[in-house]
Amino acid sequence: CGHGSFFQGSKRMRMANWLTLHVSAAMCATPPDWNLGHQLHHANVGNLGQDDYDWGETVFHTSSQFVAMPAWKQQLWRVLRHPLPFFSLAGVLTWYFKMRLPFELRPGRKAAYRFTDKLLSALLVFGVRYPAAHACGIFSLVLLG
């Protein structure tokens, strides 16, 4: 839905895509302007020379930078960059913290989320989604999913 391609065929489908984005974002408790950061991610992933996208969850080093690091730091990066901790931590830090903070970590960036969208997202997660999951006895499943 964030790609704007859920409905196709006419100019009126643009509104249908916009509505689908916002309804889906509300159901997932995700800021609806997340799609901008997602599009920038796909447009710039692997391009170290760009500065449009915030690389907060994917820090890269050149070989010479890595070799210049102390041995303990090299080992730390090897552990953190292993797929299991990397994808676990990146997802949790991005979805449960970065998108719920009432301020921007790097304001003025192209992928900055609006405060109102982050607030609405946090209210939906903590005020609706988690209490409903607790009432249905599936809180741990929803929390981990």
Image (tube, rainbow, N blue to C red):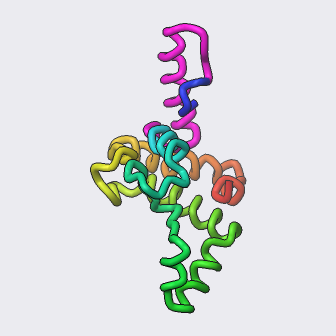
Q: Where's the N terminus, which quadrant?
A: top right
- What is the x, y in percent for residue 99? 45, 52
Q: Nearer the viewer, residue 52 or 85?
A: 52
**Residue pictured at 50% horizontal, 66% vertical:** 59
**Residue pictured at 54% horizontal, 51% vertical:** 45
- What is the x, y in percent for residue 52? 39, 48
The residue lying furthest to the front in this view is 64
Residue 31 forms part of the magenta stretch: yes
In the rendered view, would you say 7 is above or below 68? Answer: above
In the rendered view, would you say 24 is above or below 145? Answer: above
**Residue pictured at 51% horizontal, 58% vertical:** 94
In this rendering, position of residue 57 left or right of residue 115: right
Q: Where's the C terminus, which quadrant?
A: bottom right
In this rendering, position of residue 144 left or right of residue 100: right
Q: Total label count?
A: 0
Magenta extent: 6-33
The residue lying furthest to the bottom in this view is 71
- What is the x, y in percent for residue 23? 53, 29
Residue 11 forms part of the magenta stretch: yes
Q: Nearer the viewer, residue 65 or 110?
A: 65
The residue lying furthest to the left in this view is 108
**Residue pictured at 36% horizontal, 47% vertical:** 112
In this rendering, position of residue 88 left or right of residue 70: right
Q: Quadrant of residue 28?
A: top right
